[in-house]
Structure formats: C-alpha cells, structure tokens
Amino acid sequence: MAQHEIIDHDVLVIGAGGAGLRAAIAAAAEGVKVGLVCKSLLGKAHTVMAEGGMAASLANVDDRDNWRVHFADTMRGGQYVNNWRMAELHAKEAPDRVRELEAWGALFDRTSDGRILQRNFGGHRYPRLAHVGDRTGLEMIRTLQDHGVHQGIDVHMECTVVTLFKDGERVSGAFAYDRERGRFKVFRAKAIVLATGGIGRAYSITSNSWEYTGDGHSLAYHAGAVLQDMEFVQFHPTGMVWPPSVKGILVTEGVRGEGGVLTNRDGRRFMFDDIPENYRSQTADNEEEGWRYTQGDKNARRPPELLTRDHVARCIMREVKAGRGSPHGGVYLDISWIKARLPNAAEHIRKKLPSMYHQFKQLADIDITTTPMEVGPTTHYVMGGIRVDGGSQMSSVPGLFAAGECAAGLHGANRLGGNSLSDLLVFGKRAGEHAAKFARDRGSVTVDSGAVDQAVHFALAPFEGASGQNGSGDGPYQIQYKLQGIMQAGVGIVRRETEMENALEQVKALERDAANVTVPGNREYNPGWHTALDLRNLLTISEAIARAAIERKESRGGHFRDDYPNKDPQYGTFNITLKKAADGSMQLERVPIPPMPPELTAIIEEMK
Amino acid sequence: MANQTSATFRVWRGDDKGGKLVDYSTPVEEGMVVLDAIHQIQAEQANDLAVRWNCKAGKCGSCSAEINGSPKLMCMARLSELPLDKPVTVEPMRAFPPVRDLVTDVSWNFRVKEEIKPFKPRKPDAPDGTWRMDQRDVDRVQEFRKCIECFLCQDVCHVLRDHKKHEQFIGPRFLVYAAALEMHPLDVEDRVADLKREHGIGYCNITKCCTKVCPESITITDNAIIPLKERVVDEFYDPLGKLVKIFSRRKKDV
C-alpha cells in the first residue's frame, strides 16, 4: 500500500480563497491548531478574480443606507428562498468585516473626506460596494494572506483533498495528495471547514478558474451532508465573447455601475424594454435619470442595466435570439459613450476600470475608452451548496462546516453582485470560530485505516489498466469537455424538462467512462491525473444541478425554465435538497423554509 | 497569422534532474494566447505536461514562463505577437528550481515574504475605530498593491537569476511589498534597518529589468526601490547608497 504522511490539526480549513483564509484566521485567533489546504499556491485562489467590490452598508456615500436596507435588497435579489438568518447576519456584520480588512492593511478607494468609497451595483438600492478600482478581490485576498501568514497557521500549498473521513457520525479528517510529488497526506482533524468555492468548470463557458470543480460540494455530499439550491446557478450577464479563447472571461458589473450601457445591434438600449414589476419603483424610466444615478444623484433611480444579474442575462439572451446581437453572438457594453458627458472620460475610465481596460486592450485589441465591448452571459457562481446552520455554518455532519460559495443559503435564487466578497468574510469568520469551538469542546478523533486504503485505491486507479479501456477511449480532458458541453447545452441559462432529462442521462453515462479513465505518466505534477480525480466532483455536482433543476417546475432567479416561464408562489415555500442515500443514489427532498420572525418580515414589507 | 492553421511549440520537458525541449505542433486560431496552445497540447498530445495556471485572465499570476526567452504570463501572450513561422520556445522560469516541465518551485518567495515585518497601523483617527486617508496618498501605494505575485521580476533580476543571492537579497517583488508597507499612510512600523541588513537592498543596481517585465506595469525601480534606497541612505549615511541617490537624481534630471 502506498505510503502516506499523517498530519494532525484541531481545525482543518480546505480552500484558501477569501472564506478559507478568513476562517483560518478566525480559528487561529481562538488558540487552536489550524491547517489550511490550498489547491493552488497561496493567494492565487479564485477570489483574486473578483472585481467590483464588497457590499456593506457603511453608509459612507449615502447615509440612508443601513443593514435593514441591505437585508431587504439581498432577500429581494434572492427571490425570498434565501436562508433569512444568514441574510440578516450578513447585512449586520459586513461593515465590521470591511473595516477589519482596513485595519489589516487593505487600501480601498476613498471618498473626498477620506473614508472608504462605495460604488453602485446591481440590485443594491444605495452605493454600497467598498472597492479598489476593479481589482477588489486581489486586495482582499492579499490582505488576508499577508495577515494570515503571521497567525501561526500551517499552510499546505498545492494540495488537493480527494475524500473526507468520518469517525462514526463525526467528520474526522481528509485524504489529499500534493501536486508537486503526488505524495499522499492524511489530515486528522476535530473539525473541518470547507471553503472550496464553486462549480463553474462544469460548463464550457465560464468565468471560473480551473480549480472550480465543485470539490467541497462533492466531498460534503459523499460524506453524508445535505446539498441545497443546486438548481440556482448564476450566469453573469457580461462575459467576453470574442476572441474564442477568452470566451467567458468576466467583464465586471462595475462597468455598468460607472455608467456603461447595454445596446443591441441597432444601437437600442434594450434594458428599458423589460423592467420587472418588483423593481419598477426603484428603476429609472429614462436615460437621463439613469445617468444621474451613476453619478451619485441621490434623487435619481438606478438605470435598468443595474437590475439583477439573472434578469440582465436573460434580456441579453433575448436580444441575441431575436437576431439583434453583435457579430460574435453577444450584445454591446459601452462605457466610451460617457465622453459625451464627462471631460477627461478616457482617463476616468482607465482610473475606475484599469483591469478591464488592460484586459480588452491585451486580449481583444479593443480600447474600451473609444469602442464598445462585446459581451454575453457566462457561468459565474453557484448559489446552491452545502446546507448549513445559519449561525454556526455547520452542515448536517457534525464537525463539518462550510463557508463562502460552497455553502448555500445567503443568496437564495440569485446573488447580488458584491454580496460574495462580504459573504466570504462574514461567514468565513463565523465558520472558523464555530469550528474552533467545536474542536475544543469535543474529544479527539480517529481515522480508519481501511478508509485510508480505499482512498489510496481510488486515487491510484487512473494509473491502472491500459489506456482506452473506458469504452470511449477518452482521456480525462475529453471527458471533462464532454461534460461541459452537456451542461452548457442541457442545464444552462434557458432550461427545458426534456433537455435536462437527456443531460442527466448523459452525465450518468459519462460517470461510467470516468470511473475507468486512465492517464499516462507518474504522480509528479501530473495535470492529467489531477483532472481525472476532479471528474468525480464535477459529475456529482452536475447530477445535483440537473436533478434539482428538473424538480423546480417554475422560473426563479438564476433558474429559468422555458416550459415554466413564470414564478410559482408554491415553489417559494421550500428549498430543494439532495442527499446521498444508503444505496448510493441521489435523494431529493423539498424542505420547507422556516417562517421568518415578524421583525424581519416587517423590514421586507417596509422596503417593498 | 491569418492563413496560419498550425504552429510548433518547443516546450521544455523535464524535472530537477534535467530535461530537454520537445516540439509539438498544434492548430492555432485567431485570438489565441500561448496558454491556449499549451492546454491544447496537454489535452491532445501530452496529458501529463505540467503547467501552473488558474484564472487565464492575467489576474492570479500563476502561469509565468519564458516565451522565446522573454519572461511573460502565458495567458496574456498572444500568438499574433509572436513569429509563428518558427517554433515558439516555452520554458519555465530560470531563477527558481524546476519541479516539472513548466512548473518551478517558487516556495522561496513565500518564505521571504514572511520575514518582512507585517503591517502595523497607527491608532484609529475616529472614535468609531476608522481612519481617514486622502486618495492621493492611497494612489501611491495602490500601484504597488496591484502586484499579482507572478514573480517574473524575481525571474529576470540578475542578482537572483545569475548570482543566486537568494539568501542575501529579497528581490524586486519584496522590495515592492516593503515599499507598499513603508509608504502605507497608516503604517508605523520601521523596516529600513532590515532592508539594509537582512533584505540586501544594496544588491540592486537599478538595471530596471524588473520594471520592464512587470505585467501590471508597476514602476518597480523608480517608484518603489529607489525611494527605499533613499530611506536607507538617510538613516545610515551609507556611501554606496549615496552614490545611488546621486545616480537616481541624475536620472530624474534627464
């Protein structure tokens, strides 16, 4: 049997983006021994790509803002299937989490009186996003990283977790390999925090990095935890569409926050054509008012380009399908037009959106200060994830916690831009603290050697057997590409029952091919092997998305059904959950949403 | 490029014991970057070709390599800017020990960073525990904080690359990091003595190679390193540092 190293921690944090780093810092502050596992090098996690900012009702720019407005905005954006307790805690604690980052060295853009500047974003009533140009994620992860490395945390870089271990009902550890040498590591831990991010790599067009293979979702599911809301995948309205090799790369919502407009082939601002009823009172009905809003006029309502992401993505799809799209199958996003309104517009754009300027210049030969961008929807975020307790972030498996994108609840059916970075901080901290407390209160755990042997066997399987024995003869990359094609076509932005059933069948067939996939080479930094091991996670979450999407026979938030295009109030009363049954099949359940306490209901009524 | 249907990539394959350049021919199309070609080769011809990458959007700084001898991010190196009538050479960064193929051991950088004294803010300005900062003061440091830690500046620095002074010199990346802390409007820590004694700032002789390769266009030498050298000079009256100061003034006069 292959050798492995055994490493002991009180709390093991899996994932080192914003949520994982914040959790590790919080757990270390409680005085327990903390290990932090990163799939990549420290500081390279997907958080680094977040652009627009983090939402917190600091009220620095508009003093009418407070946690109650932020709470109501989050619930409205999530179409009221959110975990209201998480939405409440998030809105209340986000400002402190942002200020804390400043105390650790983050340098946000400033207001004229020297406080943290806040910008407009879709679905937020007031300017609420603390930001640094359009590279807020980098500022956040670097701040947490540079602070975190001085907190006595053991960091395991380029280390991928393959499976979790349990001691009875409790989680007790994790099995991992290091990328560099392919050595196996057994982590023994009294509590584990999953902070592995999202699932974007299950789709062919995505803004997500290679790491986003749904690891945490899948690890938790196979360890017996419950997944929730998996049908809700966010397709960000503005990804790059040209040239082909950059398809899907994110174009920040900040472009629209700074006054950028969406137009079709005929030059029409089509977003004015379809403003949903529940946002009508908050949305400008003419271009002049929309412009004034982006420039900070408190009496103006926001332009329809800043409606929620699910809605904007669907409007873009509609234009493209109606033949009014741009040459490469998108629509135009134009920030250059502001030169008609502002002196020094080009300089202003470069200052406010430096990464976007750079990205288009370098990758598409387009100067966004003079030329409109071509954009279209891209898979961006999964609202669904591991079902957790709203306060402690613990899953249904004792000792197993989750925070950030891999946890479900806060965002309901659709996440508002800017609510992700604040989510990472608020619930990363909570998960870390509660995991540390759990570890302190409970005794030690054991890892079963039989389970370790099984994990080793699974991890080494791709090296065994001759190539091509999986029937199709496909390698790991080909299987991944096939899966991405199936999910993009069958369970994408616009969904239909028959197509989803068909996709589900194909995913199950692919599962058999993946189980027999073989890879060449050895265990030393072998991406073919890594891709083969990630397949199980991708297939698990793809099945979960398809099953939940078939079950929800209505349209809500990120989940849009062509065959059920309207919202059905009955579906607003429960969440769809998925759990691994004793026979290994995926079991689906409708779990009622607990009634909201009157004080929160009152806020929602008041802000309607 | 318009009529080009395929191109040859001469990729270094090997590990810490040695390696060689291997040619791969792969189809190319409009808009492709070097990382796309490497991924295609990996998917179709060499499943185990080792390459480090994450975002493919120039934001994470993982895919640093030497393309036709120039240190670059593979995800931002467009094929349209390379002569494709001859093989495109893709090699790992040479200032760090090889792990496998295009992946190098950059762990030294993480150890060095931990040795630099962390951020230490002054007391909050307002009773609610917050600070006030002017955007102009923030601008200066924000330039340094754009760094994506791709380590291309470290790779090209001759003090590290040719003279292997990894134990005596922290390199341009961490001089930028130290500058970001030293010039942070709130920071009250003093790192000047360390810069001179522990971090070897004197080894830098301002050849500006680091500035040239920075994918974030940070003016590493002029805005970060020279002002730090001036602080060292001011504190120690170091004769070598004085020369540097005079030199840098001359530069500015030009």
Image: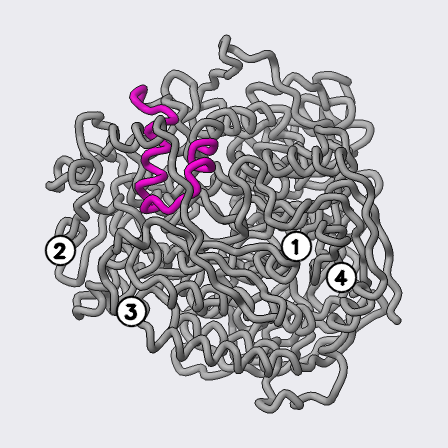
Q: Say left or right for A364 vs B36.
A: left
SS of the residue under disc 1: loop
Q: Quadrant of residue A268?
A: bottom left
Residue A404: image location, x then y, percent: 53, 45
Residue A317: image location, x then y, percent: 25, 63
Alpha-carbon distance for marks 3 and 4? Answer: 42 Å
Q: Chain of mark 2?
A: A
SS of the residue under disc 2: loop
Is-magenta flag for residue A461? no
Alpha-carbon distance for marks 4 and 2? Answer: 53 Å
Q: Chain of mark 4?
A: A
The residue under label 1 is A40
Alpha-carbon distance for marks 3 and 2? Answer: 18 Å
Q: Where are the magenta residues, as a range?
A: A62-90
Depth check, front residue: A78 or B52:
A78
The amino acid type found where label 2 is placed reads Arg
The amino acid type found where label 1 is placed reads Ser
The residue drawn where x is 32% and y is 50% is: A572
The residue drawn where x is 18% and y is 26% is: A299
Give the farthest residue toward the top.
Answer: B127
Q: Is residue B231 above or below residue A524?
A: above
